[in-house]
Image (cartoon, helix red, strand yellow):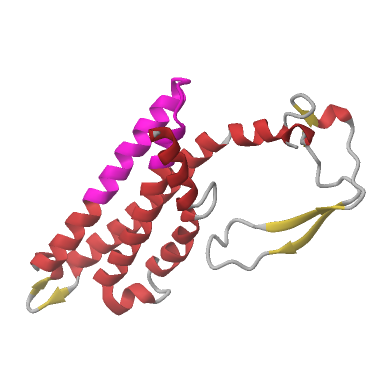
Amino acid sequence: GKRGISAFLVPTATPGYVVARLEDKMGQHASDTAQIVFERCRVPVANRLGDEGQGLKIALSGLEGGRIGIAAQSLGMARAAFEAALAYSKERIAFGQPIFEHQAVQFRLAEMATQIEAARQLIHHAASLKDAGRPCLKEAAMAKLFASEMAERVCSAAIQTLGGYGYVSDFPLERIYRDVRVCQIYEGTSDVQKILIGRALA
């Protein structure tokens, strides 16, 4: 059961610590993701984190902050995509004027900016509760759910604003789009966040 789980620090030089495989990912290439195997790996009890049997509790204790962090990461990527689209819209000339002057483009940018600000407010609220030492499981889940899904929508809209240029690697949007997709997966999928929010509403 969960009381049989303990947490340990395992230095990478420890005999039996094996990096079995580095994953080849769609995005987030600056961050290695690896399969780690412990083959008869032994560490002293001094390397244990917390008390025996508290490993699951320790692991779960970092999720609130982690979810707020992923929400903030999503927000940053959304803002980068938005700023690239905004700058391009003011430089690209079509029908004798910058495409920014076309209402359809302005509407798209307005929606992007509004979604970004809504995510920023959710994240700020969750982070302020966390900083104050108050419970924030629901608020962290809300921030992570909204910000991660918002970021993919904003990146897609930014690519649409640049047209074909948004799809090529000469511009940063295709990389941001690949990087942002995992934000709906790690630190708990969107469905997990909805479960947590639903339980908090019960």
In this picture, residue 53 sits left or right of residue 196:
right
x and y percent of residue 5 in the render? 76, 36
* Residue drawn at the location 39% of the way across and 41% of the way down: 142
* Residue drawn at the location 39% of the way across and 77% of the way down: 168
**Image quarter (top left, top right, bottom left or bottom right) of the C terminus:** top left
Which residues fall within the magenta stretch? 114-142
**Which of 166 and 141 lies nearest the eye of the viewer?**
141
x and y percent of residue 48 in the render? 80, 30
Residue 127's quadrant in the figure?
top left
x and y percent of residue 201 in the render? 38, 34
Check residue 133 for magenta coloring.
yes
Residue 34: in sight, yes or no? yes
In this picture, residue 174 sits left or right of residue 158:
right
Q: What secondary structure is the magenta-colored segment mainly?
A: helix
Residue 75: in sight, yes or no? no
139 lies above or below 135: below
**Which of 14 and 170 lies nearest the eye of the viewer?**
14
* Residue drawn at the location 50% of the way across and 52% of the way down: 189
**Image quarter (top left, top right, bottom left or bottom right) of the N terminus:** top right
Report how many numbered discs are placed on residues in the image. Answer: 0
